[in-house]
Image: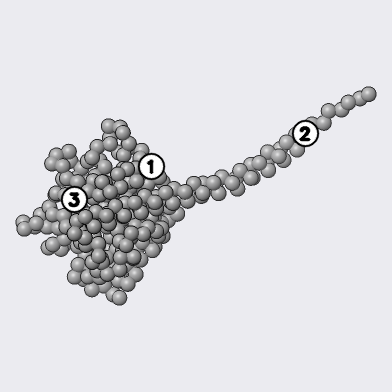
Amino acid sequence: MNHSRKAFTLVELLIVIAIIAILAGILFPVLAQAKTAAYRSASLSNLRQIVLASLLYSNDHDDGLPLLATGNPENLGLPRPRVDSWVWTTQPYFRNLNVLVDPGMGDPSGFFGSGPAATFFNQDVYPDYGVNYLFLAPWMRDANGACSLSGSVTSSGGSHPSTTIFYAGSYQPNEDANNIPIGGYTDTGNWIVTAPAMLSIVSNSPTYCVWPGMDWAMHPGTFNGGQPFTAEASQRYNHGGNNAMLDGHAMYLSNDRQAGGTDWATSTYTHTRVVSASKYLWDYDGTFFGTKPPP
């Protein structure tokens, strides 16, 4: 009796391999999108905890929101004299410093772990979420005109708290010695976010200060690989970022929505302007530091 042994032919094996490769090509992008969505959801949770901590702080401090800094903001990041940003003034209300790390970025420098880089002055300035400091924790001039003071506003004084950005995902852009973007981004966050269109408005203010070099612009072509540069606001998740609002809720916004109400400059590193106050998501009470933008 003859017993024949059946086996796959080479053609059949190649067909099976091709089918597996096609399925993998379909599934891998789906899995990557699911992973990104999970990161975005976890990041939103972090922002909810941060904004709720700030509102709890406000309840304990006569309705005042956390200060930009407990001393001269220029001394942030220095071991002495110790000056705390909102990170450490609100930390007792959220406890776990890991909420300051966006899972989509991680903590490659070890600022929020247990290593030697996990110092208070690194944690002061390098969280992955930045505060809308111009409107909600203003940086101001002293009697000599120096930018050495940190102000605050009340949590109940905003005219539209549900549409005022309090915190946003942030990053440190690569900049030259003059704070001008030179392309690309670093792997760390930033404790502040400059509101779009505010650089040109506040730069010459006798009362308020703004960090130079921070403006909102989208650069086509090779600059930053054609990606948007939006001050320290991060476009980390599908051309958008997570935000926490003044009323305590958190939400994802596309980059166009984050810069809503502005002309979001598109040519070179030019100043973005407010073109519609009603669509703007960063102002506190509609005063715009004395300017009168279009409705």
- The residue tagged 3 is 69
* Residue lying at the far left of the rendered structure: 144
Residue 295 percent location from the top left of the image: 30, 75
C-alpha span from label 2 to label 3:
71 Å
Residue at disc 2, secondary structure: loop
Residue 120 percent location from the top left of the image: 23, 40
Is residue 224 visible to the viewer in this orientation of the structure? Answer: no
Is residue 5 visible to the viewer in this orientation of the structure? Answer: yes
* Residue lying at the far top of the rendered structure: 1
Residue in the picture at 14% in, 49% down: 71
Residue in the picture at 17% in, 45% down: 83
- The residue tagged 2 is 8
| Depth order, front residue of 193/197 | 193
Observer-side mark, 2 or 3, equals 3
Quadrant in the picture for residue 165? bottom left
Q: Amino acid at mark 2?
A: Phe
Say which label, 1 or 2, has the lower sequence index: 2
Residue in the picture at 59% in, 46% down: 27
Other residues around mark 1 within 10 Å, as few (<14) / some (14–19) / many (≥20)? some
Residue at disc 3, secondary structure: loop
| Depth order, front residue of 263/97 | 97
* Residue lying at the far front of the rendered structure: 60
- The residue tagged 1 is 106
Other residues around mark 3 within 10 Å, as few (<14) / some (14–19) / many (≥20)? many
Check the picture and name the quadrant holding the N terminus. Answer: top right
- The relative height of residue 105 versus residue 150 in the rendered view (above or below) is above
